[in-house]
Image (cartoon, rainbow, N blue to C red):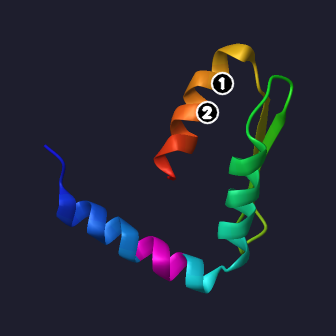
Amino acid sequence: MMDFQALFKVRQAWNQFAATHPKVPGFLEDVKNKGFCEGQEIAIAIRYPDGTEYKTGIRVRESDLELLDLVKSLGK
């Protein structure tokens, strides 16, 4: 069963996040419109105020495309 109250809270939190970080929704929309393809690189970096940084990345494989398309469809 779908928890509509939880979905409503997620929507409210997203709206607040988007208002605070207005460039992120446009970035995600651009990525969604361009789509995913084999050979594409996805990089993630997290930097803490104390200077600690964590980085990782992947090169998309054909076997990753189904999962990425599923995640993309959740944003509709």
Q: Which residue is mark 1?
A: 65
| Residue 40 horizontal/vertical position (percent) | 84, 32
Q: Bounds of the magenta span?
A: 13-17
Measured as percent of width and height from the top left, residue 8 is found at 28, 69
Circle 1: residue type: Leu
At x 57%, y 85%, the residue is 19
Is the C-beta separation of discs 2 and 1 under 8 Å? yes
Quadrant of residue 10 within the rendered picture: bottom left
The percent position of residue 24, horizontal first and vertical second, equals: 69, 69
Q: Main secondary structure of the magenta part?
A: helix
| Identity of the residue drawn at 76% across and 57% down | 30
Q: Quadrant of residue 53?
A: bottom right
Mark 1: few, some, or many residues within 10 Å (few <14, many ≥20)? some
Task: Name the one closer to the observer, 45 or 23.
Answer: 23
Residue type pointed to by label 2: Leu
Front-most of 73 and 19? 73
| Residue indicated by mark 2 | 68
Residue 41, placed above or below residue 46: above
Structural distance between the alpha carbons of marks 2 and 1: 5 Å
Task: Give me the disc on residue 17.
Answer: none
Q: Residue furthest top?
A: 63
Q: Is residue 33 above or below residue 47?
A: above
Query: Secondary structure under badge 1?
Result: helix
| Left or right: 1 as drawn, with respect to 28 | left
Residue appearing at x 56%, y 27% in the figure: 67
Q: Residues within 10 Å of mark 2 (few under 14, many from 20)?
A: some
Residue at figure coordinates x 53%, y 77% from the top left? 17
Regarding mark 2 in the picture, which secondary structure is present there? Answer: helix
